[in-house]
Amino acid sequence: MRKILYFIVAHDNQSQLFRLVLTIRSLSPESLIVIHYDASSFVEKTRYDEVDNVFFIPEPVCVSWGNYSQVGMLINSLKWIDENLSFDWFVMISGQDYPINKLYKFESMLISSSCDAFFRFFKADDPGHWPVGTSQKRYKYRYIQYPHFPYYYRLPSIIKKWVDSAVGLVNNYSPCSIIIGKGDRKNKIGFRRVVTPFVGPFECYGGSDWFNLNRRSIRYILDFVDNNKNFVKFYKRVHIASESFVHTVLMNADDMEVVDDACRYVHWGSVGHASSPEVIRSRDFSSCVESEQPFARKFDEKVDSKVLSMIDRYLGV
């Protein structure tokens, strides 16, 4: 029987993570579940001993949003999974995702599909997806981390205004540099690149972080990484590499068939171009399950645990 592998990326809220694992196991008894739990936190693994076919990535890394560590985590995890487990499809979710419909339909669709991958993608310069100029700022500058100032919040408001003004002047008027962060964030300064990999038919793509990949596409990604060191080096210095790296690799492959669908229900709310989806609450239950998607994101039992109980009853788990 062909196997589905669910890959969960998590860093906190262990009770919700364990609940997610039990629900997947109930809905998909034959699947494999692999967890990358961020190295910055401790996870109690013994509670998973009685759940069949649950594995932890043995050498997890610390992941920081916006830098290459997200891509590095994925590549390292894919290598371990490819070398150690037998599966046909890889489904990447977060610890804040949750099944909202029976998984057998989703799994049957993947197994019977002639496609290699399902994920959201678009040409990075397409203004219909990201605000104008976003892809240029992210992927055509070389970023360098500059020192973090943890007490920025203690500075007098007048000094913060000066900092804001200085950053604004650089970002609005400098043709070759850009600043991200102001003292209390992950700070980066970027310098416009003269050369990029995006030459001729090789285009830059963007999309979401959540992938459904068959074994063939995974091996293509791993081979590409091994054979294109300069491409990897380039992406180590961009901003938010995870929303472009895999998309660009697979969308520029001649013989990969990718469907523009991540198979997720995401609640973005009413804010256009929001950087993060809203937490799904009880009031969103109907729109959630009626989407007919297999998974939704994101949930937080500390904000609204009732919605997860409503979904459990709906799924019969």
Image (cartoon, rainbow, N blue to C red):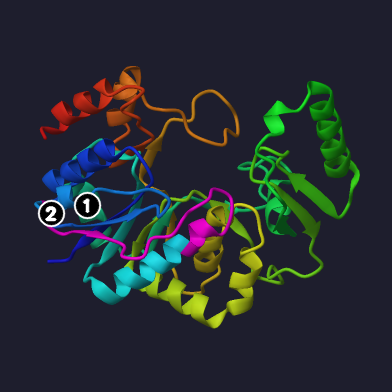
**Of 262 and 167, the residue lying toward us:** 167
263 is higher (above) or lower (below) than 168: below
What SS does tag 2 mark?
loop
**Compared with residue 244, is residue 11 higher up or lower down, i.e. above or below?**
above
Query: Which residue occupies the extreme bottom position in the image?
Result: 227
Label 2 sits on what residue type?
Asp
Residue 59 in the image: state x and y as whole percent. 36, 65
Q: Which residues are magenta?
A: 51-72
Q: Residues within 10 Å of mark 1 (few under 14, many from 20)?
A: few
Q: Residue at x 89, y 52 (%)?
A: 175
Identify the residue shown where x is 17% and y is 30%: 312
Quadrant of the rendered structure where residue 257 is?
bottom left
Seen at 52% across and 35% down, the residue is 276
Q: Quadrant of the C terminus?
A: top left
Horizontal and vertical percent position of residue 300: 35, 30
Give residue 236's position: percent from left, percent from top. Answer: 61, 64
Q: Residues within 10 Å of mark 2 (few under 14, many from 20)?
A: few
Residue denoted by label 1: 45
Residue 257 seen in render: no
* Percent coordinates x, y for residue 83 in the rendering: 29, 76
The residue wearing badge 2 is 49
Q: Is residue 94 magenta?
A: no
Residue name at image x 16 percent, y 43 percent: 22
Q: Is residue 195 above or below residue 191?
A: below
Query: Is mark 1 in CB contact (under 8 Å) with mark 2?
Result: yes
- Describe residue 212's horizontal placement relative to residue 131 as left or right: left
- 52 magenta-colored: yes
